């Protein structure tokens, strides 16, 4: 059974105080608004409407938890970087994302969504630099790769890998297309690898300590 198939919605929370008690390893998905995060999640789980897809960036205002067959959870974080969102809402989102990423002991890794046509924006780099200090792995999905020619996509992949190479093997990068359903098996192999050493087989993920971090990029 593929890692993400048959994921089931569990809970949405709007405030840090609403976070449920840890009940399994958690894999967070984050990215700039309109980078294709919801579409990527829906493609991975094989469900067209599990994660909300909006043509208006900045609509996802909650942290959404989805339970996987393995017992792990997929955690969909609010998109960041959409300037048209009112400042009060942006501060609320930033606090929500920061509290989760900084203090959630059951979080084992971050899947960062970037539009392959506009990768490594200032906010993307800020998120990577910030989260890398936790020591947890980061896997970058360069989405919408079908919008590029094969040569251009390969060049973007090489460029992003080269830029992130100084962070070491904890940061990995791949091409991904929700439209073509390409990159799914590669993503499952990388992310599934986080679960095995973390304790899904015979261990306790909730004991994984949170890293020392400062603050994530603004919402």
Image (spheres, helix red, strand yellow):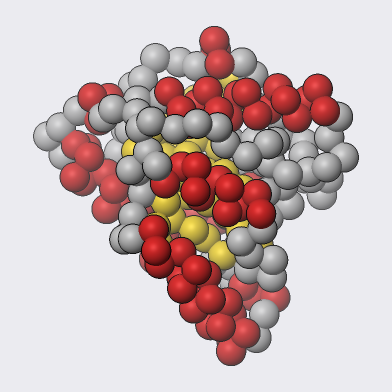
Quick one: quadrant of the C terminus? top right
Residue 153 at x, y = what percent? 59, 80
Relative vertical location of residue 6 with respect to residue 151 in this rendering, above or below? above
Above-or-below relation of 44 to 119: above
How many marks the image carries: the answer is 0
Whether residue 207 sits left or right of residue 47 in the image: it is left
Lateral position of residue 75 relative to residue 23, left or right: right
Rendered view: 183 above or below 34? below
Residue shown at 67%/80% (left/top)?
A: 148
Q: Residue at point 46% right, 64% down?
A: 164
**x, y percent for residue 11:** 54, 22
Residue 130 is situated, as x and y percent measured from the top left of the image, at 50, 42
Q: Could you tell whether 194 is left or right of 171 in the image?
A: left
Residue furthest top as drawn: 17
Note whether residue 110 is visible: yes
Residue at 50% across, 68% down: 163
Q: Nearer the viewer, residue 119 or 40?
A: 119
User: Residue 177 appears at what percent x and percent y?
Assistant: 59, 67
Camera-nearest residue between 30 and 186:
30
The quarter of the picture where residue 197 lies is: top left
- Residue closest to the far left: 202
The residue under the point 52% across, 23% down is: 99
**Residue 64 visible to the viewer:** no
Q: In the rendered image of this protein, does residue 82 appear above or below residue 159? A: above
In-front residue for pair 21/211: 211
Q: Residue 211 is drawn in which quadrant?
A: top left
């Amino acid at each position: 059974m593929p890692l993400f198939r048959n994921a089931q919605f569990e809970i949405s929370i709007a405030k840090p105080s609403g976070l449920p008690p840890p009940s399994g390893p958690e894999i967070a998905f984050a990215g700039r608004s309109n980078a294709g995060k919801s579409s990527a999640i829906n493609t991975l789980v094989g469900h067209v409407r599990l994660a909300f897809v909006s043509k208006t960036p900045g609509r996802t205002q909650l942290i959404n938890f989805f339970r996987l067959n393995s017992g792990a959870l997929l955690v969909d974080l609010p998109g960041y970087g959409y300037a048209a969102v009112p400042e009060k809402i942006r501060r609320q989102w930033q606090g929500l994302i920061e509290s989760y990423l900084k203090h959630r002991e059951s979080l084992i890794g971050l899947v960062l969504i970037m539009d392959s046509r506009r990768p490594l924006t200032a906010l993307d780099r800020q998120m990577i630099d910030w989260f890398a200090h936790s020591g947890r792995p980061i896997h970058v999905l360069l989405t919408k790769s079908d919008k590029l020619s094969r040569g251009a996509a390969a060049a973007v992949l090489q460029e992003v890998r080269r830029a992130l190479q100084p962070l070491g093997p904890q940061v990995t990068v791949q091409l991904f297309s929700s439209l073509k359903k390409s990159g799914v098996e590669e993503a499952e192999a990388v992310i599934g690898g986080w679960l095995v050493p973390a304790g899904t087989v015979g261990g306790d993920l909730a004991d994984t300590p949170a890293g020392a971090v400062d603050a994530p990029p603004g919402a």
